[in-house]
Amino acid sequence: MYQNQCQNQDPQLTKIFQYVDKDRSGLISSSELQQCLSNGSWEPFHIDTIKLLMSMFDINKRGQLNFNEFQALWKYVNDWQAIFKTHDRDGSGSISRDELNQTLTSFGYRLSNKTYDLFMTKFDRQRKGDIYFDDFIQCLVALKMLTEEFSKLDTDRDGFVNFGYEQFINAAFSIL
């Protein structure tokens, strides 16, 4: 099965997959995935970002990725990397608060300074005033998921919703 999954695939990506698939099962775990993803500062992706990516691409919900799932995840990460590099205007390898503001504004978000401060508190894990690549992915994916959940409740599309506590809990937990 393992060889069949990797046939006619990108040889470099196949090598990466085979390298991290230590037990040769044809599946990689979150810890194996973490070994092949770097945040741009020579550190592996934060485990929370790995878990988020695993949940998005583990179609069968078995806690592991097969080669096809890994290939889709790899493309997704590379697409985010291109966006990240475009918005890392100073080439520092991280996104500052101002660069994050510019990024989200370019995506159509109009958020307050307080919200950007919250993003920095949550996603600047090293407390250096910058968000590294893996946290950038997690920040934008979380924002996208929150926006989708909010949109479900904002039926008249005015940017406001009225809902009860239990509805809030259900919306919040649907993205966690």
Image (cartoon, helix red, strand yellow):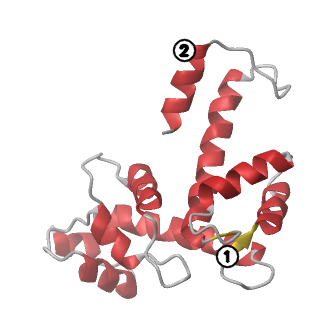
Residue 99, percent across and down?
80, 68
Q: In the rendering, at what x and y percent does residue 45 appear?
A: 46, 70
Q: Residue furthest front?
A: 127
In front: 60, or 93?
93
Q: Earlier in the sequence, mark 1 or mark 2?
A: 1
Q: Tell me which amino acid carries mark 1.
A: Ser
Residue depicted at x 80% and y 79%: 89
Between 76 and 10, which is closer to the camera in this rendering?
Answer: 76
Horizontal arrangement in the rendering, residue 61 relative to residue 121 (left or right) = left
Which numbered disc covers residue 166? 2
- Quadrant for residue 146, please give it: top right
Identify residue type, mark 2. Answer: Glu
Q: Which mark is residue 94?
A: 1
Q: Residue furthest top?
A: 164
Q: Residue at x 27, y 75 (%)?
A: 6
Q: Residues within 10 Å of mark 1 (few under 14, many from 20)?
A: many
* Label disc, if present, on residue 51 of the rendered structure: none
Relative to 21, residue 137 above or below: above
Q: Secondary structure at mark 1?
A: loop
| Residue nearest the viewer, comparing 23 with 7 | 23
The answer to whether residue 164 is above or below residue 3 is above
* Residue 160 position by quadrant: top right
10 Å crowding of disc 2: few (<14), some (14-19), many (20+)? few
Which residue appears at 53% of the width and 65% of the height? 76
Query: Residue at point 27% right, 78% down?
Result: 20
**From this viewpoint, is residue 109 visible?**
no
Query: With respect to residue 15, does 155 lie above or below?
Result: above
Q: Tell me if residue 154 can be seen.
A: yes
- Position above or below: 157 against 117: above
Camera-nearest residue between 102 and 28:
102
Check disc 2 and report its element: helix, strand or loop.
helix
